[in-house]
Amino acid sequence: MDIVDAARFAPSARNLQPLEYIVIDSSGPTEEMFRCMGFGGDTGRLEGKEPAAYIVVLINKNVPSNWCKHDSGMAIQNMMLAAWSKGIASCVLARINRDAIRKLLGVPDCYEIDLVITLGYPAEESVTEDVGKEDDTAYSRDSKGVLHIPKKRLEDIMHRNRF
Ligand SMILES: Cc1cc2nc3c(=O)[nH]c(=O)nc-3n(C[C@H](O)[C@H](O)[C@H](O)COP(=O)(O)O)c2cc1C
């Protein structure tokens, strides 16, 4: 509830608040939800370390906002930071089986299934590493199982006072 409450306080264009959330926890269909997730191939899946919970982000299509996706991004980041403040790791997923999720959770047609956040206590170690602007940013797992996430250098993406 605290995590979704963090989304509730996120900025919303014209304060229209088009977003709603479905929380799936241990009392819900977590195994079925897992089958609807598209984790990053072999790199993303850890056998036996499935997420403990899910938050499905819904956009109410009856709310006349042109900026729902921006609202969603902000709400999701709030939730991920709120989760991490409690030691809970998360991943946002766009590659999901929306038709199956709609059926599984009974989501009405007037709601768009935007993204899903998976949640759980961390099951792996990950590190970021700085890379050049033109370098490959694909993430990878090393022989010790550590996930490496390349991030473009600050000096390459931040412009001061003009481009
Ligand atoms: C809009 C969006 C969609 C994403 N969709 C997926 C996804 O479908 N599957 C997945 O494994 N990760 C997904 N991710 C997670 C990214 O792969 C991840 O954020 C990126 O590799 C950087 O890693 P980090 O968030 O740990 O820094 C998505 C991230 C965003 C922002």
Image (spheres, rainbow, N blue to C red):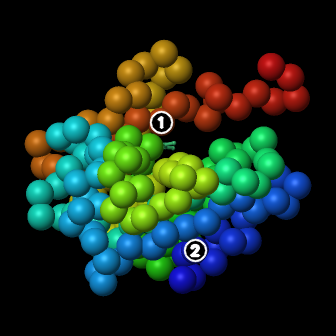
Q: Which mark is residue 151?
A: 1
Q: Quadrant of residue 24?
A: bottom left
1 or 2: mark nearer the eye = 2
Label 1 sits on a secondary structure element that is: strand
Would residue 77 be visible to someone looking at this image? Answer: no
Please tell me whether residue 2 is drawn above or below residue 109 in the rendered image.
Answer: below
Pick out the residue farthest to the top. 134
Q: Is mark 2 within 8 Å of ligand 1?
A: no
Q: Amino acid at mark 1?
A: Lys
Q: Where in the figure is residue 42, as x and y percent of width and height?
A: 17, 40
Which residue does the image show at 21% across and 66% down from the upper left? Answer: 31
Q: Where in the figure is residue 39, as x and y percent of width and height?
A: 29, 46
Q: Which comes before the other along the chain, label 1 or label 2?
A: 2
Would residue 15 be visible to someone looking at this image? Answer: yes
Q: Where in the figure is residue 146, as x and y percent of width and height?
A: 22, 49
Please tell me whether residue 146 is drawn above or below residue 9 in the rendered image.
Answer: above
Q: Is mark 1 within 8 Å of ligand 1?
A: yes
Label 2 sits on a secondary structure element that is: helix
Q: Amino acid at mark 2?
A: Val
Quadrant including the N terminus: bottom right
Pick out the residue farthest to the front. 109
Which residue does the image show at 54% across and 53% down from the upper left? Answer: 109
Q: Which residue is mark 2?
A: 4
Which residue does the image show at 73% across and 71% down from the upper left? Answer: 9
Q: Are marks 1 and 2 in contact (CB under 8 Å)?
A: no
> Camera-side residue: 81 or 107?
107
